[in-house]
Structures are given as C-alpha cells and as structure tokens.
C-alpha cells in the first residue's frame, strides 16, 4: 500500500497529464475549426449625402449591395449616410486612405487631389459630352494621385449643371452681390467672389441647417441634387450652369488588392457601367425635376445668354491662374483640354 504522500504525488501527476491532454485536444479542435471571415472582408461604405432618396445616394447604396452580391461571400458592406459617421465631406478620401471606411463616393476631393479640380473650372465644360472629353485627360492623373494616398479610384460620374437656388428671389447674376452662397469647391467659390458674393463651402449633409438658419442665402447644386429634400427652404432658381461636378468612387487600395484578381476586375466593370448609367439618369432627371419644382412653387428663371457669355469671359483668366498655381502639369493639361473643347 502506498504512503499518503506518494498517493498525493501520483494523483497530482495524473491531473497534470489530463490537463496537458485536454489542452492539446482543445488546440487541435480550434485548429481544425473553420476560420471566421477576416476583418478585411467586412467593409464600411460612406456617402457624403445625408439624404437616402437622391439619385447619387440611392444608387451608391445599390452599387455597394451589387458589389457584395457579386463577391459571393467575399465581402460584407455596411452602407452609411453622410453625417452618420464623424467624417466631414472634405475628408472622405482621407478616411478611405486611413481604412476608416473602405469604399466611398468622393466629390470633395479638390484639396487633396488638386489636378482633378480641372473638371470643376467654371464655364469650361458645357455638357456631359465635354466632360467625357475632359476626363480622358484628367482621369489618369487623378488615379495616379489617389494611388499615392493608398486609394484606388474605381470610376466616376458627372452631375448635371450646378445652378443657383435661393431662399429669396434671384433673377440674374447681379443678384449674387452681397449674398452668401453655398459652394462645393473653391472653383465654384471663385465665381461667387468675382460677382460680389461670399462663398461658403458645405457638404450636402450640412445644407438644410445652413438654409434654415440663414447661414447661407442660396446654394449651388443641380436640380437632381438635394433639392427634392430642401425645396421647402427655397423660393427661386437661376438656371446658370456654373460647372458639371464629378464624383469618384474610391476604395482603400490595400483592402481592394486583398480581393481575388477576378473579383477586382468584375467590380471595376460593375462600377464603370453603374456610373455611366447614373450620369445619364442624373442628366435626364435634372430637366424633369426642374419642371416639377417650378410647378410646385419655386420660381424658375432661365439664364440669360449674354450673362453666360459674360461669366465665361470673366473666368478665362482664372482658368490660367488656377493652372499656373498648380504647376506645369496642370498648365499642360488645361491647354490640352481647351484645345479638345475648342475654348
């Protein structure tokens, strides 16, 4: 018969052996279990639009859903409206670069992708066909500069012309004088300053409060922009098309490159088609909505041809100054664009 001390030692040894065997079995079980999806497979999408019903917001949401479906389980994408995350519209591409969100639509890129501002020069582009010609020159440059920030540009779309909308009545370009006007870029702001107004740069999510509180007297946007949501705050519109802004669909490069190559190709093709369709939809809807809003009480004033000519003439020196301050590449690109467009 074993002494009590020896019995204790044997029991302890058996307990230790059982513990080691249990730990080994547990580790083996976890090693053979399916590995859960990595964080790289879970994306956040962000739009600067705080309104879910406008074309650009609605279509971007559908695009993220289509990408998720196309991925066949590779991706899960959570869509976020403007203002629901602590991301200012002008910081969207920084948020994508920093992997805070993984895919977004970016229309407030002018400060961080300066060369792309060529697309926003006032009165340079007279329509979507002009924008298509311009973007054959600008897009490769914008893609390169986004890439330097760890961002992949997947495609672009063009908005209809940005025109004036006022809390009061506006019948001519002269009415800009002394007014505070919401703009979406410094290039639009130059028009406002040139005709005696004060530009206020705001993202779409901030527009309703700014109109309600009188922070701005008017705004520049397209009829197919946020007017459907803001029309109760507006009384008139002057249909002078300042420019045709573009928005880029961008993704975090590191996340995007982790996807299978064939899926990357499919996503690029999906974005290209979706944005071409969206551009056409926006142009079509813009004309229809302008008539609709006029019938609903917003007074519509057509732009006077002589004022359009006056404004373009006034802005041509600014085009040159704008390009020179951004260096030889911008000067060369502008010259090429003007030649292609005949301006």
Image (spheres, helix red, strand yellow):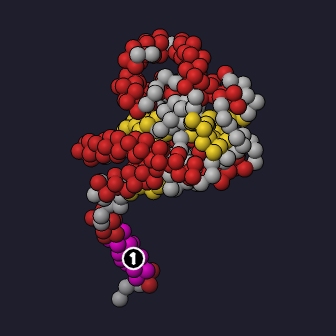
Measured as percent of width and height from the top left, residue 313 is found at 56, 16
Tell me the magenta residue range.
7-23
User: Does the magenta run of residues contain 132?
Assistant: no
Q: Residue at x 72, y 25 (%)?
A: 196
Judging depth in this view, the residue of 156 and 134 nearest the camera is 134
Judging depth in this view, the residue of 223 and 262 nearest the camera is 223
| In the rendered image, the vertical position of residue 5 relative to residue 158, given as above or below | below
Quadrant the C terminus occupies? top left
Quadrant the N terminus occupies? bottom left
Q: Residue at x 63, y 24 (%)?
A: 190
| In the rendered image, the vertical position of residue 244 relative to residue 29, given as above or below | above
Measured as percent of width and height from the top left, residue 296 is found at 59, 54
Q: Residue at x 50, y 56 (%)?
A: 53
The quadrant in which residue 271 appears is top left
Residue at numbered disc 1: 15
| In the rendered image, the vertical position of residue 237 relative to residue 2, given as above or below | above
Question: Does residue 38 appear to the left or right of 222 in the view shown?
Answer: left
Q: Residue at x 34, y 69 (%)?
A: 26
Tell me if I can see residue 336 in this picture. Answer: no
Prevailing SS of the magenta stretch: helix
User: Does the magenta run of residues contain 21?
Assistant: yes
Tell me if I can see residue 239 in this picture. Answer: yes
Judging depth in this view, the residue of 191 and 148 nearest the camera is 191
Measured as percent of width and height from the top left, residue 261 is found at 25, 42
Measured as percent of width and height from the top left, residue 144 is found at 40, 26
> Circle 1: is it few (<14), some (14-19), or many (20+) Cα within 10 Å?
few
């Amino acid at each position: 018969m074993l002494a009590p001390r020896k019995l204790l030692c044997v029991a302890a040894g058996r307990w230790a052996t059982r513990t080691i065997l249990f730990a080994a079995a547990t580790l083996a079980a976890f090693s053979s279990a399916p590995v859960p999806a990595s964080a790289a497979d879970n994306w956040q999408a962000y739009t600067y639009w705080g309104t879910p019903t406008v074309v650009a917001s609605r279509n971007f949401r559908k695009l993220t859903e289509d990408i998720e479906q196309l991925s066949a389980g590779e991706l899960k994408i959570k869509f976020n409206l403007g203002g629901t995350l602590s991301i200012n519209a002008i910081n969207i591409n920084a948020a994508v670069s920093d992997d805070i969100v993984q895919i977004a639509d970016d229309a407030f890129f002018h400060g961080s992708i300066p060369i792309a501002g060529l697309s926003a020069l006032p009165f340079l582009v007279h329509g979507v066909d002009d924008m298509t010609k311009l973007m054959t020159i600008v897009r490769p440059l914008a893609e390169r500069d986004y890439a330097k920030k760890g961002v992949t540009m997947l495609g672009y779309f063009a908005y209809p012309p940005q025109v004036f909308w006022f809390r009061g009545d506006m019948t001519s370009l002269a009415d800009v004088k002394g007014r505070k006007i919401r703009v979406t870029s410094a290039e639009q702001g130059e028009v406002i300053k040139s005709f005696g107004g004060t530009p206020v740069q705001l993202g779409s999510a901030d527009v309703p409060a700014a109109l309600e509180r009188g922070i701005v007297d008017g705004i520049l946007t397209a009829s197919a922009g946020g007017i459907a949501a803001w029309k109760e705050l507006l009384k008139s519109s002057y249909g002078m098309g300042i420019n045709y802004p573009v928005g880029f669909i961008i993704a975090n490069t590191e996340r995007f490159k982790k996807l299978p190559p064939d899926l990357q190709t499919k996503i690029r093709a999906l974005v290209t088609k979706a944005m071409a369709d969206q551009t056409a939809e926006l142009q079509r809807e813009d004309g229809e909505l302008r008539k609709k809003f006029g019938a609903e009480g917003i007074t519509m004033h057509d732009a006077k041809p002589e004022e359009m000519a006056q404004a373009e003439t006034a802005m041509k020196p600014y085009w040159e100054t704008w390009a020179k301050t951004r260096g030889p590449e911008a000067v060369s690109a502008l010259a090429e664009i003007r030649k292609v467009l005949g301006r």
